[in-house]
Image (spheres, coloured by chain):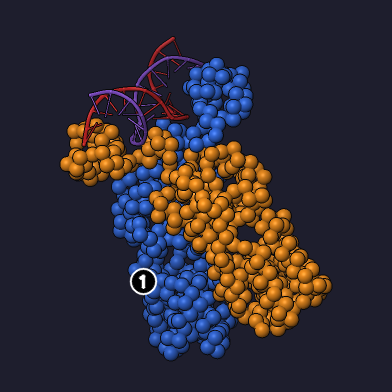
Chain colours: A blue, B orange, C purple, D red
DNA sequence: ATGAAAGCGCTAACAT
DNA sequence: ATGTTAGCGCTTTCAT
């Protein structure tokens, strides 16, 4: 593959040692006399020797590679998580094999199997919804898995998340406090555990606790135009305050409201639930539940390094703090 | 690594054939009698045999893995390119090892060397600027490299791009035709080949050809706040029409102009040069040079598959069409 | 501290 | 059409 195909054997011969010694030098094993080490190092430099990671992987059964499963690279929620993951991966000298799995001919479990066949040392899984097949595939393996910004049904996999219930409740309180009583929760997929187990129950509890009427949950709002097209329905129903989980959709909703002459935030308030770049550049600026996406990714990857090192986890489920950032899409009384 | 560590040898024994035959079945080699194939397949299913890709890689010297070098995952320009790359990679059964290289402790050539050590079959490089070290590292190897949405100085590497000169000239004509004569080109890095060899010469030629006065090039405008903070200077200098290369910066510039009471597009026109999601959701909507980012990525990856297959390229440098999308940040007379 | 040798799991001649 | 065998480049006992 490389032009100069210098192997460990060439180095050994040239340095007049065995390949075992070269291997020790390369791997920083201390059982090498300083002189020998220096001599070997010199030859390595001179011959431009680079270890073949595939051969190392086969012999050692560790590839220093982790798999990343992500629905969509162009979704900033996952991109920002990935950045945190990547930075920690670099720190610990892991490479990342990335696989996006949304809208794909290839089934998710096939993607996962492919990753496992490549002998990745661990996997980070991100998604709105951990599919059945994915969960099954993970359970069939020893390879450690961590979820980042993703919840599974029965907490079977280690994860890094925020407290979605608490965050949503705080946001709903903000809306209510601003005098908005016809509230809506707008999600991408009702059946995603994050919604089914956290956001929706929190919303329903809040509505019940405050004896609100005419509140509603809207499902299947995933992209810009979904958000844009939803506004008329909300207006007709008199909804005047929403939490919307996808940043791109919130922007669509905002633009739609403005285009139809709604006053934001006087008549209609929006809280968006991720705080990606896209939510922060529109006008009026969106009030947002700021999730520490970079940190969530970093923490998840750090957990994975521990698992790959058989160190065990103090906390199987790490919950990071969020912030409710009050901007111009809410009155903030 | 996997719980059931079934090897090709187990399958061979169980199916009463040699491992060579199993290998043939796994690799779709036709030199196997149908009965034998069926029997082997049955055993493979029954034992849940999965080939170890690392061993395959070592023996065959092909890893079906390509390296992707990208400055920043959260930059939508690169994310959208990556999506095109990824889709074609899946089609041709390649995995992707992704390495982001901006703001990193690890030097770029070390990142590249790491990729080569993992025996990737090819590399796609994306950046504003192909660094010296990167170019050197690539030249030391046989591994094919393709640039996506990236230009190198002397066209030494195959690439997929648009005609930046033509695109910018068309945009400048739009501005001039709208009556804007104090024009600016706003870039991230003057020294990036894409700017030094294409955008800047095109801008200078346009200014000279049309005998315009007070036009200027602004450098080092890379993120939202750079764009936001630049506007006052533009206003002071009387600049009334700009092409700006980074979408995030354009949005900063737009918001800044609006905040300071400028009328867009009456007094100040903006054309942005990538057309990522972020440029399309702000109001007023930005006129943009729409680069076919997904396609650029897809084409680059397709080129790479050919090179990895020793097929050779008809065209070493592919130029895809762009579109000038006229929105509300220009008058479009 | 160093070396010899046996694999890691597979592919790819080569032989039959 | 199938089997035999020699690697691929490295790590890792086990000796010494």
Which chain letter matches label 1?
A
Q: Residue furthest left?
A: B35
Residue A202 position in % (x across, y down):
40, 72
SS label for mark 1 = loop
Q: Residue at x 57, y 67 (%)?
A: B322
State left or right for residue B181 relative to residue B23: right
User: Which residue was labeled with disc 1?
Assistant: A190
A306 relative to A171, above or below? above
Q: Residue at x 39, y 34 (%)?
A: B59
Q: Residue at x 23, y 39 (%)?
A: B32
Which of the 4 quarters of the picture holds residue B15?
top left
User: Which one is in front, A93 or A3?
Assistant: A3
Q: Label 1: few (<14), some or many (≥20) within 10 Å?
A: some
Which of the 4 quarters of the picture holds residue A154?
bottom left
State left or right for residue D13 relative to residue B113: left
> Can you say which quadrant of the picture contains the C terminus of chain A?
bottom right
A116 relative to A177, above or below? above
User: Which one is in front, A93 or B192?
Assistant: B192
State left or right for residue B142 relative to residue B54: right
A294 relative to A214, above or below? above
Residue B116 position in % (x across, y down):
53, 40
Residue B166 position in % (x across, y down):
65, 66
Residue A174 position in % (x across, y down):
52, 78
Q: Is residue B326 visible?
A: yes
């Amino acid at each position: 593959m490389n032009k100069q195909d210098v192997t460990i054997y060439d180095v050994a011969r040239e340095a007049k040692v065995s390949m075992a010694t070269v291997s020790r030098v390369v791997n920083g094993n201390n059982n090498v006399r300083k002189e020998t080490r220096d001599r070997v190092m010199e030859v390595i430099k001179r011959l431009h020797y680079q270890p073949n990671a595939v051969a190392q992987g086969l012999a050692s059964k560790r590839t220093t590679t982790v798999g990343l499963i992500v629905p969509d690279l162009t979704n900033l929620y996952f991109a920002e998580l990935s950045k945190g993951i990547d930075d920690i991966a670099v720190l610990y000298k892991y490479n990342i094999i990335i696989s996006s799995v949304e809208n794909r001919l290839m089934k998710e479990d096939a993607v996962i199997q492919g990753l496992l066949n490549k002998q990745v040392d661990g996997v980070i899984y991100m998604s709105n919804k951990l599919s059945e097949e994915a969960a099954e595939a993970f359970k069939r393996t020893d390879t450690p898995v961590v979820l980042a910004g993703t919840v599974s049904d029965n907490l079977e996999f280690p994860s890094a998340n925020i407290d979605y219930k608490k965050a949503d409740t705080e946001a709903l309180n903000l809306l209510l406090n601003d005098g908005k009583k016809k509230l809506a929760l707008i999600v991408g997929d009702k059946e995603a555990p994050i919604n089914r187990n956290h956001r929706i129950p929190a919303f329903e509890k809040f509505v019940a606790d405050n004896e609100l009427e005419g509140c509603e949950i809207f499902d299947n709002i995933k992209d810009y135009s979904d958000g844009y097209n939803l506004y008329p329905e909300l207006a007709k129903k008199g909804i005047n305050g929403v939490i919307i989980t996808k940043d791109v959709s919130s922007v669509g909703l905002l633009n739609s409201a403005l285009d139809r002459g709604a006053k934001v935030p006087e008549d209609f308030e929006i809280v968006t639930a991720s705080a990606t770049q896209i939510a922060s550049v529109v006008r009026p600026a969106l009030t947002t539940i700021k999730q520490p996406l970079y940190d969530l990714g970093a923490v998840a990857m750090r957990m994975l390094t521990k698992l790959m090192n058989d160190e065990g986890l103090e906390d199987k489920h790490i919950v990071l703090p969020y912030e409710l950032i009050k901007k111009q899409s809410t009155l903030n009384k």
